Amino acid sequence: MNGYFVFILAVLVCSFLLDTILRIFNLRSLSPELPAEFQGLYDVGRYERSQQYLRESARFGCVESTVELSATIAFILAGGFNRIDLAARSLGSGEIVTGLVFTGMLLMVADLLNLPFSAYATFVIEERYGFNKTTATTFIADHLKGWLLIAGIGGPVLAVLLWFFQAAGQGAWLYCWLAVSVFQIFMLFIVPVVIMPIFNKFTPLPDGELKTAIEDYAGGQKFALKGIYTMDGSRRSTKSNAFFTGMGRFRRIVLFDTLIAGHTVSELVAVLAHEIGHYKKGHVLQHLGMSLITSGIMFYVLSFFIGNQGLSAAFRMEHVSTYATLCFFAFLYAPIDMLIGIGNNVLSRKHEFEADHFAAKTCGGGSDLTGALKKLSVDNLSNLTPHPAMVFFKYSHPPVLERIKRLQQSC
């Protein structure tokens, strides 16, 4: 039996088992007793509802991952990749165009598999728990916009990578890495002003008490505001959030309209202080640096598998090609990617604590941010007691109770 196939099969099964075990651990960590920190915010019924939401989401996730695993293995064994490759080759175009068609067709197959699950999660589970505001029209429009972006941005990037592997020989991985690095940096500037407005409406924060308070705080921290915007998150969900995006004069601080509606001015300033803390502590540049380094590692490892006949045979391919290798390599690289993801999550959780500390230090204590975190958790039906293993493997943010404890210590 093909060694690559055995390895890939083991990776797929182990990943599935790990996710399933983590979900089971997470469900077992649920406590019927409301944590003392949330007394008076959660009533008994809503707290139980938050746990029902987690249980239903976990069961649904198990079903989805089971179907995905079964479909992926069946697709490999049935020669599905080869059938798509032969269909792409039948157009009689060159390697790059054939590669774009092959990749596009694979993405369509994967998307068709995922679409029913996405629709069910949105229109059944999220609807059942009062979160969904997405209409069928918006759902379809988002889907079509996503495809246009993949074709308009992802297509040219893939074409460049395929061209480098054709023209640059053994050093192609380095040119690909440099090209992707430039693209990543470019996207940091473009996403806030070009990509994100395609999906949501961003409105400058209007004059008033909140804007004045934010400007006063930012001025005191010598943080030059390039834009504070509200986003129509309520168009799709009742859940709320805030985030920092962009670089240089394109950087934006974004507050969901649902966040503004449910919090006091001092709490919103504290949330904003947290986001500014990420910038002040250099977290944005650190994450960018890590991303560039890990993509370099990926391309270097990839260079050893380009044109590998054994890897192509594992997927029942009749022809060996660079574009197919790029796809198959993702299966091989999954364990490394998981380890890198764990490392990134550890770093991200550390950064969240640092940004919380910055907000507490510059806002006269952590009470306002603590209040905001509690309200966010209640409004979003967040899991208050996730299992430590789930946190280690999957969480980019620390559990809310840990954040509250740290904030109370910093007061």
Image (cartoon, rainbow, N blue to C red):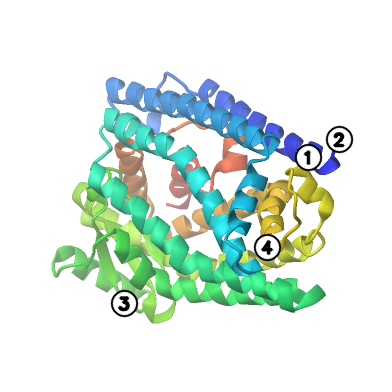
Look at the picture and state if 403 lies above or below 231.
Answer: above
| Residue for point 25% across, 57% down | 266
| Amino acid type, callout 3 | Gly
* CA–CA distance in space, label 3 to label 4: 36 Å
Instruction: Choose top left, top right, bottom left or bottom right for residue 246.
Output: bottom left
* CA–CA distance in space, label 1 to label 2: 8 Å
Q: Nearer the viewer, mark 1 or mark 4?
A: 1
- Residue 217 in the image, given as x and y percentages of width and height: 30, 70
Q: In the rendered structure, which disc, 3 or 4, sits on the residue that comes first in sequence?
A: 3
Answer few, some or many: residues within 10 Å of disc 4's Cα (few below 14, many 20 plus, some between 14 and 19): some
Pick the front one: 269 or 293: 293
Decide if residue 65 is on the left or right side of residue 55.
Answer: right
Look at the picture and state if 88 lies above or below 18.
Answer: below
* CA–CA distance in space, label 1 to label 4: 25 Å
Is residue 194 something one can see in this rendering? Answer: yes
| Residue for point 19% across, 70% down | 212
| Residue for point 79% across, 60% down | 307
| Amino acid type, callout 1 | Phe
Residue underneath mark 2:
1
Q: Secondary structure at mark 1?
A: helix
Residue contact at pointers 1 and 3, CB within 8 angstroms? no
Q: Nearer the viewer, mark 2 or mark 4?
A: 2
Q: Secondary structure at mark 2?
A: loop
Decide if residue 243 is on the left or right side of residue 72.
Answer: left
Residue contact at pointers 1 and 2, CB within 8 angstroms? yes
Answer few, some or many: residues within 10 Å of disc 2's Cα (few below 14, many 20 plus, some between 14 and 19): few
* CA–CA distance in space, label 2 to label 4: 32 Å
Residue underneath mark 3:
219
Residue underneath mark 1:
5
| Amino acid type, callout 4 | Thr
| Residue for point 38% across, 22% down | 52
Residue underneath mark 4:
294
